[in-house]
Image (cartoon, rainbow, N blue to C red):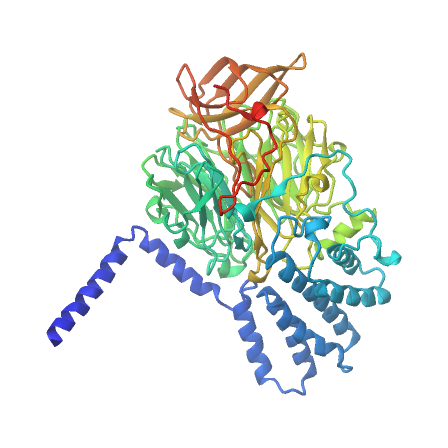
């Protein structure tokens, strides 16, 4: 009997070991587990669990007579509790301190500020998170966004009024008290006149039809910390799917939602194996092995200082059967640098996608130079950044690639927090890849300020790529800057976007002010798309920083024919006050207009928030075209290829230009080109310049409002039959919100 039991135990152990061996990426999973253990440390600013244990241990061994240590400890403890999401415990920690007459006034000011925020956050948790709805936290707060449980906001208001009575110049408290009154439905009428910030959320000069957040009904409202998003067709069924990440390497795993093509999504996170992989502030799609299946790259370690940021990235191969495998190690991509800045492109024109990574160097002690991985065409890569002269060291927060000078070679632009913006010109010659720093020559070194997201795009359809970047310079919480702007006290650099127009001669001009983008934003996640199918690219910016007090709205700007940008945040109802990260534009329901997905949530677990899918109601009856490109000599995904659409609109000939890419540096839109055509009734010409191969193809006399697939070298295109559908909730009840008529949005047979 004993022998039999031993045999059974041995067989069980062998079975467990066999299962472990069957994991094709177990080595990488082990590396991630080791990284998770390093993450837990009280010196890690983004690990509140470890910090709480440390503070408690200090307080336990400190005599009660040491008032300063205990006050500072309680203050820090309240911050940590808020980071962990326990607003009530933070309140209970701070309230007794207010009645302790031994505490100096200087300490009390900080205690009151923290307590006011804790009250506000308690209100958000009770209303916006635990009883989440489509209008929650949408600025200006109204209707369904008004709190039902008002106790948190009322307590915050009482405290902020006392603080402002002593210090009327406290702009942080002034901004937050106005927000608090909004949550009660009492702005502006009940705000004390001396504290009122007038005209918050005033009517936009140019208005659009409001979007509606339908993430909750479709099951896409996962509640995570800061992270990225990819919208892409991962199973080649014609319908784009959604993948999101969370930067918390200990808890936040990848989510994969498969589009069922009928208005519903299936959570395939487990069956795809993507739920095995945690962390990643940013993610993007690629097809590194040219097999026609979109793979996923995960960037980790961003913002974390010292060894805490030394986290591995992941290349997740699409196996074509609904699953993904981590091939980072075997591909030669394993390195340990903090990053979220990645761009895939064919830099040496050999028909295979290469990878540029912008890493974050936060001090001079440990450098994290940028990396360039050249594709070996066999599933592996070779790192050549030093050889190619692009291994610069900076606190890189965004990278983008494109052919800014139209010479057939893809260049790189780098955005960094330490005042460096760098344009690297590709000087590929006779197969030798190298880059030249042309920042000064291009006129891009005049503004030395901290910047975050960036992209190449052609905002005015002149056939030349322009550069977009966002300032991220701040010395205090962002509500202060929002208040200053609203009160007409804006400083020079207050988180505004910067737009550099391509002069067609290798130089750029800063046109930010004259084009109307000099507005406070503080963008993190961001992207561009065409919300009204007029052929001009619009902007959506996810805003914020790690501070809870930085409650500022996300921003949407409409492109006015390449001449101006209009702030349409209020009329569009897309100005969420919660932290905004990865952004993607995509036509998720095949009705011809682009919807907007944003991955929400802050740096701390207690600042997690539900993601949003803003459904486009259909802004007009403009026409459109959706193009899926497949390279042959060019890389299979056609990344970097150029599209030119020419047509007659209202008697005038015009062209729309698009590059094939995933959009901005923080958020990934699908690679298929969704192109607005305005009032054009027919397309005169489609011109494709294939990246890498240099081949140009043209197609003429094309009908509008249809989905096409174009394969490099083929003389004809393929019509893809995709029907528009209504989004449904998880109970399959129709949400009658697709307002576009069948006539305007039907696929042309």
Q: Is residue 238 visible?
A: yes
Q: Quadrant of the N terminus?
A: bottom left
Q: Residue 154 at what x, y percent from top left? A: 75, 64
User: Is 281 in front, or is 192?
Assistant: 192
Give me the residue at 55% from left, 46% from top: 215
In the image, is 604 to the left or to the right of 167?
left
User: Is 719 in front, or is 561?
Assistant: 719
User: Is 214 in front, or is 411?
Assistant: 214
Residue found farthest to the right:
193
Give me the residue at 55% from left, 79% from top: 57
In the image, is 32 to the left or to the right of 154?
left
User: How many numbered marks are there?
Assistant: 0
Q: Residue 182 at what x, y percent from top left? A: 75, 54
Residue 29 occupies which quadrant of the picture?
bottom left
Q: Residue 373 at what x, y percent from top left? A: 42, 40
Q: Is residue 440 visible?
A: no
Residue 587 occupies which quadrant of the picture?
top right
């Amino acid at each position: 009997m004993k022998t039999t039991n031993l045999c059974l135990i041995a067989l069980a152990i062998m079975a467990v070991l066999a299962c472990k061996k069957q994991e094709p990426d177990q080595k990488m999973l082990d590396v991630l587990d080791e990284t998770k253990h390093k993450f837990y440390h009280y010196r890690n600013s983004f690990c509140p669990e470890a910090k709480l244990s440390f503070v408690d241990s200090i307080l336990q061994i400190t005599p009660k007579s040491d008032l300063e240590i205990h006050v500072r400890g309680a203050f820090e403890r309240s911050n940590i509790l808020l980071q962990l999401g326990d607003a009530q415990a933070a309140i209970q920690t701070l309230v007794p301190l207010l009645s302790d007459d031994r505490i100096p006034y200087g300490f009390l000011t900080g205690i009151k500020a923290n307590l006011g925020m804790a009250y506000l956050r308690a209100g958000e948790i009770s209303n916006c998170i635990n009883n989440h709805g489509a209008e929650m936290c949408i600025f200006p707060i109204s209707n369904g966004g008004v709190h039902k449980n008002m106790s948190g906001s009322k307590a915050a208001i009482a405290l902020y009024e006392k603080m402002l009575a002593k210090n009327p110049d406290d702009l942080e408290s002034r901004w937050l008290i106005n927000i608090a009154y909004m949550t009660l439905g009492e702005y502006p009428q009940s705000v004390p006149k001396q504290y009122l910030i007038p005209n918050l959320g005033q009517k936009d000069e140019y208005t659009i039809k409001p979007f509606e957040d339908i993430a909750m009904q479709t099951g896409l409202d996962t509640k995570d910390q800061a992270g990225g998003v990819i919208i892409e067709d991962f199973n080649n069924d014609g319908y784009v799917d959604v993948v999101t990440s969370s930067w918390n390497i200990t808890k936040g795993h990848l989510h994969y939602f498969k589009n069922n093509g009928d208005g519903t999504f299936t959570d395939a996170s487990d069956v795809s194996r993507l739920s095995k992989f945690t962390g990643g502030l940013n993610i993007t799609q690629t097809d590194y092995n040219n097999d026609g299946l979109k793979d996923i790259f995960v960037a980790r370690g961003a913002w974390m200082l010292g060894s805490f940021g030394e986290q591995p990235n992941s290349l997740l191969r699409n196996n074509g059967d609904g699953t993904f495998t981590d091939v980072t190690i075997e591909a030669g991509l394993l390195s340990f640098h903090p990053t979220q800045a990645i761009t895939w492109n064919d830099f040496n024109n050999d028909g295979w996608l290469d990878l540029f990574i912008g890493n974050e160097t936060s001090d001079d002690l440990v450098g994290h130079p940028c990396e360039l991985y050249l594709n070996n065409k066999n599933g592996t890569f070779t790192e050549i950044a030093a050889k190619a002269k692009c291994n610069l060291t900076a606190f890189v927060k965004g990278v983008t690639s494109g052919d800014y000078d139209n010479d057939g070679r893809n260049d790189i632009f780098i955005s960094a927090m330490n005042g460096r913006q760098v344009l690297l010109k590709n000087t590929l010659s006779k197969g030798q890849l190298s880059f030249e720093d042309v920042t000064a020559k291009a006129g891009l070194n005049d503004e030395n300020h901290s910047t975050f997201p960036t992209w190449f795009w052609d905002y005015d359809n002149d056939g030349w790529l322009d550069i977009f970047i966002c300032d991220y310079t701040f010395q205090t919480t962002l509500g202060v800057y929002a208040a200053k702007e609203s009160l007409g006290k804006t400083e020079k650099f207050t988180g505004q976007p910067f737009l550099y127009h391509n002069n067609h001669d290798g130089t750029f001009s800063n046109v930010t002010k004259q084009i109307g983008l000099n507005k406070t934003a503080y963008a993190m996640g961001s992207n561009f798309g065409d919300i009204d199918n007029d052929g001009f690219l619009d902007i959506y910016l996810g805003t914020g920083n790690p501070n809870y007090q930085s409650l500022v709205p996300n921003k949407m700007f409409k492109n006015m024919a390449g001449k101006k940008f209009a702030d349409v945040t209020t009329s569009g109802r897309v100005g969420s006050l919660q932290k905004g990260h990865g952004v993607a534009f995509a036509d998720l329901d095949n009705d011809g207009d682009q919807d907007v997905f944003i991955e929400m949530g802050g740096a701390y677990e207690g600042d997690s928030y539900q993601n949003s899918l803003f459904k486009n109601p259909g802004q007009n009856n403009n026409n459109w075209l959706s193009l899926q490109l497949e390279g042959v000599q060019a890389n299979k995904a056609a990344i970097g290829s150029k599209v030119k659409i020419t047509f007659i609109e209202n008697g005038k000939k015009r062209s729309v230009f698009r590059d094939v890419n995933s959009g901005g540096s923080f958020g990934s839109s699908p690679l298929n080109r969704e192109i607005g055509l305005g009032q054009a009734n027919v397309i005169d010409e489609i011109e494709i310049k294939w990246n890498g191969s240099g081949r140009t193809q043209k197609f003429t006399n094309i009908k509008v409002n249809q989905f096409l697939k174009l394969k490099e070298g083929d003389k004809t295109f393929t019509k893809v039959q995709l029907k528009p559908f209504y989004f449904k909730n998880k109970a399959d009840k129709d949400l009658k919100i697709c307002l576009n008529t069948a006539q305007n949005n039907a696929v042309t047979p």
